[in-house]
Each structure stands twice: as C-alpha cells, then as structure tokens.
Image: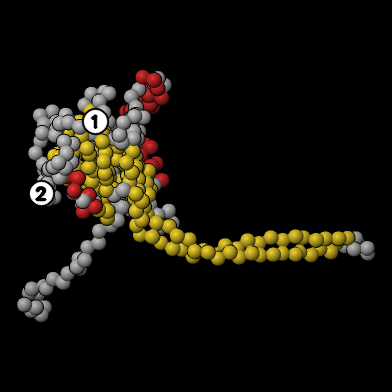
Amino acid sequence: MSDHVAANDAEIQELSEDSTEDPSTTDVLPPFDIGLFPTGDEGSSFRTQNDPSAPLQRSNYIERKGAVDIRCSCLDVVHGLFSAESEVFATLIVLQFRFNARKHARRFESVDISLEFGGMKPGEGGPEVHAIAPEGRMSLVPTTQHEEVKRSGGLQLGGAAPVGGVTATGTVGWEKSVSRDTSDETSVTGSIDLKGRNWGESNCASWTLLENKTTKTGVPTSMRTAVLLKRKDESPFQCVVKIDAKVDFKSSVERLFGGKGREPKDDPVLFDPELEPTNNLRKYEIEELRAFNLESVWDVTFATKLGWVLKDKAQKGGGGADSS
C-alpha cells in the first residue's frame, strides 16, 4: 500500500513539474493524442518512425491503439511525369485510413486529416498538391427525423371579492404546436490548401469526417484517398501527416487520465522520386499521371456487414440422423 502511495506521489510530482514548464521552450505538439487507458494502454503512445536502415517511403504512416484505433497506411506511391509532352514531374500517392472502436459505445465524433508536403530543407517549396480524391463535400447515410415541439403559457387573473375578503382567480392559457422534419447526415469533406506559409502553390491535402449528430453513429470506419502532386524536379521531399480526432465523452475521459496526455511526434514521411512505382493496386502509366482518374481508387466505408455468417453444421454419430 505504501509503495502504491509513493508511486502516486511521484506521478503527481512529475505532472506538477510538467505544468510549470515554460511554454516557449516546448515543441509544438501534433494535435492528436490518445493515451486511452488509466494505466496506459499498450500501443496508445506508439510513435511511427522511419527505419534507420531504409528511411524512405515507409508504408505505415500512423498507428494508434486503444479504446479507439487510428491507422494510416500507404497503398501505392508512383513517381513519374505529369504528361508525356511536358517537363513537369508528378507523384501519385494512395492512402488508407482506418478508424475503429474496440469497446462498445465508443466512437469518433469527428476526424481532421492533413498531409503537408515540403522540401527536405527549411525554405524549400516542395511539391504542389494538384488534385485529390475525394474533393468537396460528400454525404453518407442521410437520415430524416420527425419532430413535434409544443410550447405552452398561461396568465393568472385574480381579484378580491367584496364580501368576506375571498379571492377569486382564473387562468387563461395557450398552447402552440410546431411539427417539422429534420435531416442530418455523416459527411466527408476534402480540400486542397496552403498551409504553413502564405506564398507559393497549395502544399496541403486535407479531409474532415463528421458524424451524424442525430444518430451518433460515428465517422466512417475506413477511407481510401488519392493525391496527385506536381514537382519541378527530381529532388527528394517529405510529408508531415497529422490526424486530429474528437472522440466520445467516455473515450476522452480515459484519454485524459491515460499518461501525461502527450502525443509522441511521428517522423515525416520521406519520398525519393528515383524509387520505382509500388504498383500494389494496379499498374500505372508513369508518363501520364495527369490522365489517371483519382476517383477510381478513392473509397469510403461506413461499416462492413458480413453475409452468410450463420452456418449449419451436421453432427456425426451420437445416435442422430445421418445427414451425409
């Protein structure tokens, strides 16, 4: 018991020291942290780093585990030309995002994703985000709900009778009923942005996933996206991937009490245009990446339902009927 108290005192002392830390000396933290369990769930503070022996173009961008899981992985990277007749270089990137709950009644209320591209050195412009998919606002699983709102009020009137001082009162009341249909939906919105600077071409691809606030069913569990970049040369470049997720109240409480509430910083993803295409999903025309239809690879899944999961198995022996 004394050991437990001592451990708690040490943790409180450590938290107290953190709270007095000079903000000007601390690094800017990525926006999403997920230390989900009071004891610190295994994998919730996992930091994705580049392999020292092979640091270029890792496939596992982000991995967080806990009561809710977040994963971002790369399915394909293809370097080539924007078009055969131009001298503009291009890169196609296809990513898979997954947002899964590992406990009942846990969910993501919203998710913000950003991919910020830049050069390998400070001040270098890096590639331009030319096109993304999905782009614009997409509606999923729309719902309609009928509501009937009643408002009532009253005015009480009273007066003293001339005999015996008896007070006679009366109430005049009214009631108003409003009937309406309300609509809501889950949505996915994608945009091409200028981030981290106020000059040059757009350098960021971003997506926002919002749950249906009426049904509270969370965001889609899976989303595949595509990004087409334009490059001026064959210089290596990097991408900073950030995911900011808002979870349900119970998960946020667990997140608050899990560890120090800090998110380890993932390494930027490093790209080398001299590497060969991965061609995992298909074979791409590397000299005509402009002509590739990004809509053909993007996808969003709200939930996966398995059919034919109930099966009859014949029992052999035991005096039962022979089903063979």
* Quadrant including the C terminus: bottom left
Location of residue 201 in the rendering, given as x and y in whole percent from the top left corner = 30, 34
> Dot 1 corresponds to which residue?
126
> What residue type is disc 1 on?
Gly
Dot 2, crowdedness within 10 Å: few (<14), some or many (≥20)?
few
| Residue 302 to residue 115: above or below | below
Q: How is the image coloured?
A: secondary structure
Residue at 33% across, 24% down: 27
Query: What kind of element bears circle 2?
Result: loop
Q: Which element is circle 1 on?
A: loop
- Residue 139 rendering spot, x and y as whole percentages: 36, 56
Residue 169's place in the image compared with 274, above or below, is below
Q: Is 186 above or below relative to 306?
A: above
Q: Is residue 147 visible?
A: yes
* Residue 262 x %, y %: 33, 31
Q: Nearer the viewer, residue 80 or 122?
A: 80
Task: Name the residue rendered at 57%, 62% in the picture.
Answer: 149
| Total labels drawn | 2
242 or 237, which lies in front? 237
Which residue position holds label 2?
A: 283
Q: Mark 2 or mark 1, which is nearer the start of the sequence?
A: 1
Q: Quadrant of the N terminus?
A: top left
The answer to whether residue 152 is left or right of residue 190 is right
Quick one: which residue is furthest to the bottom in this view?
321
The reply to whether residue 47 is in sight is no
Single out the residue that lies furthest toward the right.
Answer: 163
Q: Position of residue 228 (x, y in %)?
A: 22, 42
Is 268 displayed left or right of 39 in the figure? left
**Which residue shows up at 14% across the image and 41% down it?**
85
| Residue type at numbered disc 2 | Lys
Work out whether residue 307 or residue 80 is closer to the camera in this orientation and state it: 80
143 left or right of 97 in image:
right
